[in-house]
Image (spheres, rainbow, N blue to C red):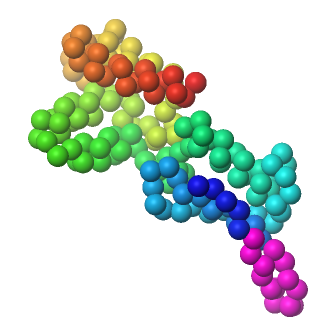
Amino acid sequence: MVHIQAKVRTNSRGRKYTRYIVRWTPPGSDIEGSKSFEQRVNPRKPGTAEHFEAQLKESIRNYGYVDPKLGQTLVKEYAETWRDRALNINTRRLRQGFIDDLGELATKTLVQVQASSVREWLDVLVIHGRPWAKGRKLSPSTEAVVAVPANFAEHRSE
């Protein structure tokens, strides 16, 4: 949900002015984000509340929205949180295996990951072999489990 709130304030000289605050709740979250602007104007003028609101709605609609705070999280940290949410010990082990195979992706922040990064990572896992695993390639069964979600993510981002 994204909306603009107008706040009328009074400065130290008694003069009233309006600030426009874009408020949003990211998908899958209950933590509200906000950003304030001096002008509301129109959706085509950068630096205005309506422009920011339009861009935010578009990125949410196209699954391109990344919470700025969450975007600074390392892929490995995010994956570890995902692993820790697993209720079953076997699921935790499988997710740990995924984390162990992140390679260079592990040190990237979430906003740094592009479709090309995912393609390069898959090439290392499947074609070239994993340097951190003595050059071993993924087995075909593991490749299918890893490649399907990664390819889905790749198609969404392009």
Q: Is residue 119 left or right of residue 17?
A: left
Who's the residue at 17% across and 46% down the image?
Answer: 87
Residue 143's place in the image compared with 96, above or below, is: above
Is 1 placed above or below 74 here? below
Say whether residue 17 is magenta.
Answer: yes
Is 38 covered by the magenta stretch?
no
Quadrant in the rendering for residue 95 = top left
Residue 82 position in % (x across, y down) = 29, 44
Residue 44's quadrant in the figure?
top right
Task: Tell me how many marks there are.
Answer: 0
Query: Looking at the image, which residue is at 21% across and 36% down?
Result: 96
Residue 18 sits above or below residue 109 on the image: below
Viewer-closest of 130 and 122:
122
In this image, 92 relative to 43: left or right? Answer: left
Give the magenta-colored segment's residue range: 6-18
* 114 relative to 119, above or below: below
Whether residue 154 appears in this view of the structure is yes
- Residue furthest out toward the left: 89
Magenta stretch: dominant secondary structure: strand
**Viewer-proximal residue among 87 and 75:** 87
Look at the image and tell me in which quarter the C terminus lies. top right
Residue 113: x and y in percent read 49, 33
Res 7 quadrant in image: bottom right
The location of residue 157, given as percent across then percent down, is 54, 28
Evaluate whether residue 131 shows in this view: no
Q: Report the residue at 72% width, 52% height from top.
A: 52
The image quadrant where one finds the N terminus is bottom right
Instruction: Locate residue 128 relative to residue 63 in the image: left or right.
Output: left
- Could you say where residue 137 lies in the image, as x and y percent from the top left? 25, 12
The residue sitting at 82% across, 61% down in the picture is: 40
